Image: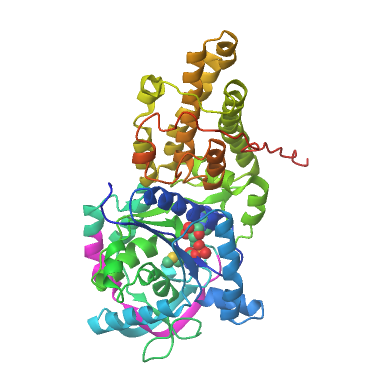
Amino acid sequence: MTKGERAYYVTTPIYYISGEPHVGHVYTTVVADVLARTARTFQPTFFLTGTDEHGQKVANAAAAAGKTPQQWCDELVPRWKALFAGYHVQYDDFIRTTEKRHIVKVQRVFEQLRERGDVYLGKYEGWYCVNDETFWLASKLVDGCCPTCGREVEWISEDDWFFRLSAYRDRLIEHFRRFPAWVQPRSVYNEMMAILEEGLEDLSISRTNFDWGVPIPGDGGVIYVWLDALLNYITAIGWSEDEARFRTYWPASTQLIGKEIARFHTIIWPAILWALGEAAPELVFAHGWITIDGQKMSKSLGNAIDPFALKERFGADSMRYFLLREAPFGSDFSYSEEKIAQRHNGDLANDLGNLLQRTLSMVGRYRGGVVPAGRPGASDFAQTFAGLPMTVRARILDLRFREALEEIWRLVTALNRAIDERKPWVLQKEGRSAELDALLYDLCEGLRWLAVLLHPVMPERTRNMWRQLGDPGAIDADWSSTLARWGGLEAGTRTAIGASLFPRIELLAAEP
Ligand code: ME8
C-alpha cells in the first residue's frame, strides 16, 4: 500500500470483562499496536480495541463478586485501560459494548435483519457453553462437555430469534475460494472451509433466560452476546450514522483474533455483514496461543500470567519484543520467563543496547560527543541497507513480525561487526582520523535507522535511544522521508550518553 490509498483499519477482539486481563490479551493488542504504529507513519490509520461486557459469563462473574454487572464492568475497565497504557498501546478508540453509542446500533442491526427476513422466530433447544458463550450441537460435544474449553454445557430450551446463517453458506464457500488469503493462517482457513463444507445451521441470536445484554427491540429477551460483540467493529466507526467516516475505514484491513474464535469471525461475521449489505473484512488473522506446559493460557484454566507483574519485571518494550520475535505469528508458542530473559539479555542488552553504549562512548571519547562528518554516500551500509525500510514495512503489514525483526537485526549485526573488525580504538591510536570519522558516522546513522525501524515495536526504549542520539527530528514520521537515504543524521549533532537501554536481568535459578 502506498500513501493516499484507503485508510488502514485494524481491530482486536473485544475482551470479556469477566476478570483480570492476562498476557494473551496483551499479545493481540500489542500486535495490533505494532501494525497501527507502522501504518500510521504513512497512511491514515484507525486502531480499535475494547471490552465485551454483556452475556452470561460476565453476569455470572459480577454476581459471584456481589456486584451488578454494570458496576463490575465499570470497576474493571480502568484496569484494562491501565494495562494497555502500561504496554504503550496507542489505540484510537476503546469501545465498551455497554455504551449507548453501541447499543442503539446493535438494536438497529437487529431491526434491519428482521425487516429483511434474515431474522425469524423459532424454538431453540440445545446445549450452551457459558464460558465460550457458544451454542453446540449434541454431536459436537466431547464426553458431554464443550469441545473448546471442556466445561459442562447447559441445556437451553427457549423461543428465540434466529439468523438465517444457512442461507449464506454458498456465498461463504465462494468467498473463501475467491479470496484464499482472506483468512490466515492456512490451517485456520482449511478448518473453516471444512466447517462450511459440512453444512451450516441457522444461529440463535437471542437469549430469554437472563437479561444482561442489549434488549431486543419490541420483544422480551436480549440479543445474543456474540452478535452484539461482533458488531463493535462497525458501530465504533460510525455505521448507520456517519457514512463518510464509516466508508473511510470499512472494510477493515486486518482483524486480529485468537484461533479459538475463528468461526465467529470468518463464518458468522461475514454473513451478518452481507445481510446488512456491507463487505467482509479484507483479512482475518487468527493467531496461535501462548501456552504453558502445552495448555492454552486462559482465565478459565487458571494458568493465566499477570501482565502487570511481567511488565515490572522485564519492561513493557522487552515484553513487546519477545511477543513478536519469539514465534512466527500464527503459531502457538510456549511461554517461559527464561525465554523472555534470554531475548532481553541476548538480542536487546547485548546486541542493541551495547551497540548504542559502545558507539556513543567512542563518539564521546574521540569526538567530544559530536557526530563527525562521515562519507555516507560512499558507505557500504548505504548500499546494503537501502531497501531495508520498505522490506521491514512490508513484512510487518504482512504480519511476518519475526522476519521483520530478523531483517532489522541484520543491520544490528553489521554495525557490531564493523566495530569489531575495524576497531575504532586502533584508528584513533594510528591517527586515521578520516576513517574514524566515517566509521563513527555510520554507527550513529545506523543507530538512528534502528531507532526509527524499531519504534513501532519498542516505542519507549527507541525514544530513549533517540534522545541519546541528539533527538534528530520526528522518530515516527514516514520512513520514506526519515530513512530516504543513508546520511540523514546531520554532522554536528550532539549526542548524550544515557543510562543503559536494557539493563541485564538475572533470573534466579529455579528451586529444585
Ligand atoms: O473471546 N494466547 O474474549 P476473551 C494468545 N469476547 N491470545 C490469547 C490467549 C492466549 N493464551 N488468551 C486470550 C472473547 N487471547 C470475546 C471476543 S470479539 C467480537 C469477542 C486473546 O476475553 C486472543 O486474541 O476470551 C483471543 O481471541 C482473545 O484474547 C479472547 O479474549
Model colouring: rainbow
Write the residue at 62% across / 44% down.
336
Asked whether residue 198 is in view, the answer is no
Residue 9: x and y, percent?
35, 58
Residue 407: x and y, percent?
42, 33
Write the residue at 46% across / 44% down.
475
Q: Is residue 327 above or below residue 28?
A: above
Q: Residue furthest top?
A: 430
Q: Nearer the viewer, residue 325 or 495?
A: 495
Q: Is residue 448 left or right of residue 175?
A: right
Magenta stretch in the rendered image: 151-173
Residue 209: x and y, percent?
49, 85
**Quadrant for the C terminus in the image:** top right
Quadrant assignment, res 242: bottom left
**Is residue 82 found inside the magenta-colored segment of the image?**
no
Q: Nearer the viewer, residue 410 or 473?
A: 473
**Is residue 156 found inside the magenta-colored segment of the image?**
yes
Q: Is residue 435 above or below residue 461?
A: above
Asked whether residue 308 is in view, the answer is yes
Residue 297: x and y, percent?
57, 55
Q: Is residue 301 above or below residue 371?
A: below
Q: Nearer the viewer, residue 47 or 21?
A: 47
Write the residue at 57% across / 46% down.
317
